[in-house]
């Protein structure tokens, strides 16, 4: 079992910035994929950004504004969010996907609220 704890959410004005953090309860393995998802009211959960040992990918809606990074020494993944827009308002969830020969295991944090409003 892996526990993930997000922090850094809050209320910010349009155009502002926030940095989300996700601390894992164990070492992040090189084979683990980490990601940030979000879910707005009435909408499905969607992938925002993901990072592996050698790649990153982003949803089109956040490219150029958000940056995902990982610090394996601190067992932490970050999401730097700049130029925030009202449509970025959602609960943001951290995900860790552990890959084994048999199957993948997905672990989720409890979520952190991000509200972009003037």
Image (cartoon, helix red, strand yellow):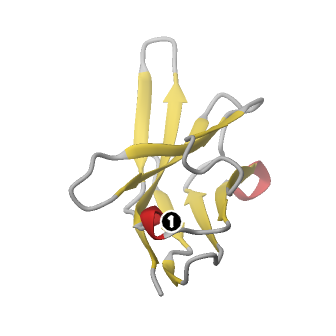
Q: Nearer the viewer, residue 2 or 93?
A: 93
Q: Quadrant of the N terminus?
A: top left
Left or right? Give the position of 36 relative to 106.
right
Residue tagged by mark 1? 6
Examine the rendered structure and indicate whether residue 83 appears above or below residue 37. below
Q: Residues within 10 Å of mark 1 (few under 14, many from 20)?
A: many
* Residue 62 screen position, x and y as percent: 59, 51
Q: Furthest-top residue in view?
A: 101
Q: What is the residue that sits farthest to the bottom in this orientation?
A: 118
Q: Is residue 17 above or below residue 104?
A: below
Residue at (42% x, 57% y) in the render? 109
Q: How many marks?
A: 1
Q: Please report the residue visible at 59 percent of the width from the left and 35 percent of the height from the top.
A: 33
Q: Which sits in the foreground, 114 or 29?
A: 114
Per the image, label 1 sits on a secondary structure element best described as: strand
Image x and y of residue 59, in percent = 55, 41
Lateral position of residue 35 relative to residue 102, left or right: right
Where residue 44 sits: x, y (%)?
Answer: 28, 46
Q: Within the image, what quadrant is residue 78 found in?
A: bottom right
Q: Is residue 43 above or below residue 98?
A: below
The answer to whether 50 appears left or right of 70 in the picture is left
Q: Residue at x 56, y 75 (%)?
A: 8
Residue 45: image location, x then y, percent:
34, 47
């Amino acid at each position: 079992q892996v526990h993930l704890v997000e922090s850094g959410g809050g209320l910010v004005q349009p155009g502002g910035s926030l940095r989300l953090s996700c601390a894992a309860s164990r070492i992040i393995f090189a084979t683990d994929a980490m990601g940030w998802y979000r879910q707005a009211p009435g909408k499905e959960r969607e992938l925002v950004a993901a990072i592996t040992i050698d790649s990153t990918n982003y949803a089109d809606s956040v490219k150029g504004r958000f940056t995902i990074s990982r610090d394996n020494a601190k067992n932490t993944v970050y999401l730097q969010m700049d130029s925030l827009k009202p449509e970025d308002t959602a609960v943001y969830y951290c995900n860790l996907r552990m890959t084994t020969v048999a199957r993948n295991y997905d672990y989720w944090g409890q979520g952190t609220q991000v509200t972009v409003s003037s």
